[in-house]
Every structure is written in structure tokens, then in C-alpha cells.
Image (cartoon, helix red, strand yellow):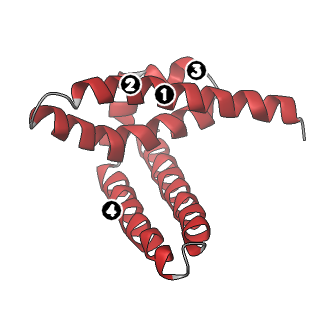
Amino acid sequence: VNFGDDFMFGLKIWAVILIYGLVLGVVALIPVIGWLVDLVGALWMGPMLVVFLAHDEDFGAAFNFKEIWDLFMAAPTEFIIAILGTMLASIVASLGVIACVVGVFLTSAYAGLVSAHLYGQAYQAAHKTAG
């Protein structure tokens, strides 16, 4: 395992999330429309960007909106299931507070793994459909 490569890959993911977070943060300042755009960005675009970056390992892949949209349209049901599963996992993760607050760390990590798995499956299904 080359930790230098892993660190650089994590840095790329962090940079993509930072860029989109800044853009969505500015858009969120617009009442109602901005909040809806922010919600869509958080639930759909964020995980999709990380999936694209993880697959291609190219920083520019996270900004290829046409390819991301085409892949989403190839298997929209799978991506909607991934979105709903991520929301459910996040709700369950917030219940970790009941376990003396320490449980939040474990349940949040598990929710992240569930989300990554669901989006990975959706990406694979869309790739097969898109051919």
C-alpha cells in the first residue's frame, strides 16, 4: 500500500468537496431556490462526484456534468434508492447519540460506508445499462 498515493487521492476528494461546498454555500444564500439547489447538491451531486473521482482517479472527472447526468439517467431508480438509503442511514446514525454520544462516531462511520456502497452499486448498474 502506497500511503502517498492514498493521501493524494484523499486530498483530491477533499478539494472537490470543498469547491462544490463553496459554490453550494453561495447558492444557498438565495431564499427557497437556493435551498432546493443546495438540497439536490448535497443529496445527489456530492456522492456522485466522489464516485466519479474514485472510478477515474481524475480530478476533472468530478466536473464532467454531462457524463454524470447521462449516467444518472441510465439508471435513475438505482440512484434514487441510493439517495433514500443514504438518508435512512444518516437518520439511523444520528441515533448514536443515545449510546452516550460515543455511538455517533461508530454509527456515522457505518452510515458513510452504507452510502458509499449504495452509490457504488448504482454507478455499476448505470455503467452496465449505459454500455
The residue that mark 1 highlights is 18
Could you say which is closer to the camera, residue 64 or residue 99?
Answer: 99
Q: Secondary structure at mark 1?
A: helix
Residue drawn at x 55%, y 79% is 100
> In the drawing, does residue 28 fall left or right of residue 43?
left
Disc 2 versus disc 4: nearer the observer = 2
Task: Place residue 83 in its image quadrant.
Answer: bottom left
Is 35 above or below relative to 104? above
Query: Residue 77 location in percent, x, y?
Result: 30, 56
Q: Nearer the viewer, mark 2 or mark 3?
A: 2
Is the residue under label 2 in contact with that under label 1 (CB below 8 Å)?
Answer: yes
Q: Are marks 2 and 4 in contact (CB under 8 Å)?
A: no
Secondary structure type for disc 4 = helix
Residue identified by numbered label 2: 22
Precedes in sequence: disc 4 or disc 3: 3
Q: Residue at x 48, y 27 (%)?
A: 18
Disc 4 marks which amino acid?
Leu
The vertical placement of 79 against 111, above or below, is above
Tag 3 residue: 59
Q: Give the Cα separation between the discs numbered 4 and 3.
A: 27 Å
Viewer-nearest of labels 3 and 1?
1
Q: Identify the residue under disc 4.
A: 84
Taking the view exactly as shown, the residue that stands out farthest to the right is 1
Q: Determine contact: label 4, label 3, CB under 8 Å.
A: no
Q: Quadrant of the N terminus?
A: top right
